[in-house]
Structure formats: C-alpha cells, structure tokens
Image: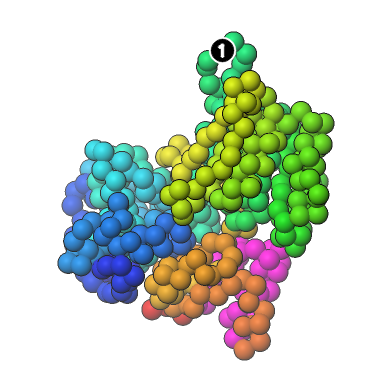
Amino acid sequence: MKTRAVRLYGKNDLRIEEFELPAIKDDEILAKIVTNSVCMSDHKAVEQGSDHKRVPKDIDKNPVILGHEFCGEIVEVGKKWKNQFKVGNKFSIQPALNYKGSLDAPGYSYQYIGGDATYIVIPSEVMELNCLLPYKGEAFFLGSLAEPVSCIVGTYHAMYHTKNGSYVHHMGIKEGGNVAILAGVGPMGLGAIDYAIHADRKPGLVVVTDIDEARLKRAASLYSVEEAAKEGVRLVYLNTKESVHPAQALLELTHNVGYDDVFVMAPVAPLVEQADTILGRDGCLNFFAGPNRTDFKATINFYNVHYASTHIVGTSGGNTEDMSESLTMMEQGKLNPSSMITHIGGLDAVPETVINLPSIPGGKKLMYTHYTLPLTAIADFEEKGKKDPFFKVLDEITKRHNGLWSLEAEQYLMKHAPKH
C-alpha cells in the first residue's frame, strides 16, 4: 500500500513523500493514521537530526517518519495478532517502547511508523510491549492527545508523601490536600486543572496562577469554579502580577499551612523559588516544565528540606499505564483536553510547523494527515471564514463549543476538507 508521509533526512530537512509500504509480516499490523498532534519534541528531533538520541545515524539514506502523538484505525492484522486486534478498531500508541533497552521510538526512529503519515506499518515490538492501545472514543483528535495527557497523569502519580517516622513513600497527590499549579493556564496547565478536578483522587484546594488576566479568565471559563465545587474541589484563579507579595498571597489561601503539592509549569527560576516558598510540611514540588538550558538552576530552602521534609520530583512523560488511564477517562467523558488545541492543519503544513514551532504562539497544533490544509489558528476561523465557507462553518461550530475544537468540528472537517 502507498503512504504519504513527512520524512526526516537530516537537520531541518523534512520532506513530504509518497512511497510504497512493505507488505506486513505475520507479526505486524497495517494502520491508517487520521490525526497527529505536533509536539516540541518533534521540533527538537528535527533541529538535532541524527545527533538526537532517538534518531538513527543513517537518516540521510533511510529517513524516518516523524510524529508520535497519533490516532487512527487498524486496516490489516498479521496472523499473530488476529485474536487481539480487529480491523476497524481505533488505536493510539505509547511511543516510549524501551524495547530491549533501546531508545528507538515511533516518530523518531522508524522508517514505516510515525504519526505524520497516511498509512503505517506497526512493528511487532509495539504489540509485544502492550503499547498499541485500543481507543473506544469517537473523536480521533482525543486519541492523539492521549500521549500529552499521559504526561499530566504521570506527573500526578509521581508526587509522593510520607508519614512521620516512616520512610515509605505514598505515591500520588495528598487526597483532600492543597494543590498549586503555577503558570498554570498554558495548554498543559489547563490539562492539569482538568485532571485535578476530575480524577478519582482529588485535592481539597486547587490554586492556579498566572500573570495574564485574559488567559486566567479564559481558563476560568473552561474549568469553572462552580464545576470544580460540584466535584468537591475549591478552585481559585490568582493573578500573581497584581500581588505585592505573591508567595504570601498564595499562603494566605491555605491559612498559612502551605501546599502539599505544587506543580511548576514554566522553567523560570523565580517561579521554582516561589513554589519552594509555599510548600507546607512534607510538601512535594514537581518541576513539570522542561528547560532548554542544561545549566538551569534555582535556589531551594534546604532548612525546610531537612526539618519540614519538603522534596522535589520531576517527570518527563507518562508511561503506558498513564496513557491507558488517559484514554479511559476521555472515553468516559471525565477528561476533555480540547483546550490544548489552538491550531489545525493538514499533512502539507507539518514541515513548516515543526521547524518553526517555537515561534508559533498557542498550544497544540493538530494535523489531519489525509487532508490539504494550511496551519490555521482556531482564533482565526472567523476572519478566514469571511472569504472561505469551509472556515465559516468551522467558526460557527467552534463557537458553539466555547471556542474549542470538538467532535462536531472534526466530523465536518473530515467530510468537507480538501483531500490530497
């Protein structure tokens, strides 16, 4: 079968090519990709080329297909997996395989599997490691978001606490405790709010900070104080730019007890130090945001480390269990990470988007791989709709959904967008 894919040949050398996929072996699966969301990790891989730890050295001769946040349908199943997987089933993939200690991963290392393609061949190791994950939801784009959502799920599970006199680490946030999400209204911060409110283990208080009032108001319209209250969570949005002493304002919301769990969503040293300041006894600070600088540092109060048992964790992605939980919660309607998506596009928009990603504002860029569409911000649908009826209807649909991408928008796109 022929596929059309974005392939990496070298540093910033991405090419859209059509080529023949090999016939699947008995232990492989042929699949159709529908959606793939672009990740900053894609940009890093393209920027570094074969210097990247997951990218092979010979991509100039054997290029790899880019993209690791994808969702699609199974087209053909090899004999080995016929009792486990069925044609037509939707799926997502956990790309961090760790197969036999290798760093190889779909979207970085393989010639015939990656999200920026129309069709792919899924190799046996993906199934052997239980990394081909069934998805029973309707919207393909949610399946694409399972991987980034799993990063949020994983970071909540990575938090830990102890009891006086015990060295046992009790994993997860403190149930009924105080949570702060600092710089928390970006795409991943919004996901962290969603999970805090709707996961089985809930905090009693969630305080979300930022210095942009418009972004805070937008977050509050997506995840309202009233909705959180129905789930038994007190949700507070705080503009720390308006506080003379932000840390003190945060502490006052806990009656100066401090926070059990603090998530730092931006790699800014003063923000890390603020997080450290507001930790309560046995407080756990999660440095979620990955810095670009290898020498990134911030000051930590080691008096509190010693006497108040404060501690730090860091996570860089979710595991297969986290991704399965993400898919299940989305299937059940408990999580709706649509707020992460700010742009949509087609396969032809992928190379320029990935290469220029750091300079493109907004959150997730979602690509529909069988369609020809320029990268377009949801916020620009109205203006584009003045000349293009396609975007006029998409604008009307997204406005019905509080400005968010939705199943209705996806279904309209897949019916009316121009195909290759």
Residue shown at 43%/68% (left/top)? 354
User: How far across and how far down the image is residue 83, in percent?
Assistant: 30, 41
Residue shown at 17%/67% (left/top)? 61
Q: Residues within 10 Å of mark 1 (few under 14, many from 20)?
A: few
Q: Can residue 395 be seen here?
A: yes
In the image, farthest residue toward the top: 165
User: How far across and how far down the image is residue 412, in percent?
Assistant: 56, 71
Residue shown at 45%/37% (left/top)? 321
The answer to whether 350 is drawn above or below residue 180 in the figure is: below
The answer to whether 216 is drawn above or below residue 204 in the figure is: below
Prevailing secondary structure of the magenta residues = helix
Residue shown at 59%/86% (left/top)? 388
Of residue 333 and residue 353, the one placed in the foreground of this image is: 353
Q: Which residues are magenta?
A: 388-417
Q: Residue 21, located in which quarter of the rendered image?
A: bottom left
Q: Residue 9, located in which quarter of the rendered image?
A: bottom left
Q: Can residue 350 be seen here?
A: no
Of residue 290 and residue 229, the one placed in the foreground of this image is: 290
The answer to whether 77 is drawn above or below residue 347 in the figure is: above
From the viewer's perspective, tell me whether residue 293 is left or right of residue 224.
Answer: left
From the viewer's perspective, tell me whether residue 32 is left or right of residue 392.
Answer: left
User: How far across and how far down the image is residue 282, in percent?
Assistant: 63, 24
Q: Which residue is denoted by mark 1 in the rendering? A: 166
Q: Secondary structure at mark 1?
A: loop
Where does the C terminus fall, quadrant-wise? bottom left
In the image, farthest residue toward the bottom: 387
Where does the N terminus fall, quadrant-wise? bottom left
Residue type at the position of mark 1:
Ser
User: How far across and how far down the image is residue 210, in percent?
Assistant: 70, 53
Q: Is residue 7 magenta?
A: no
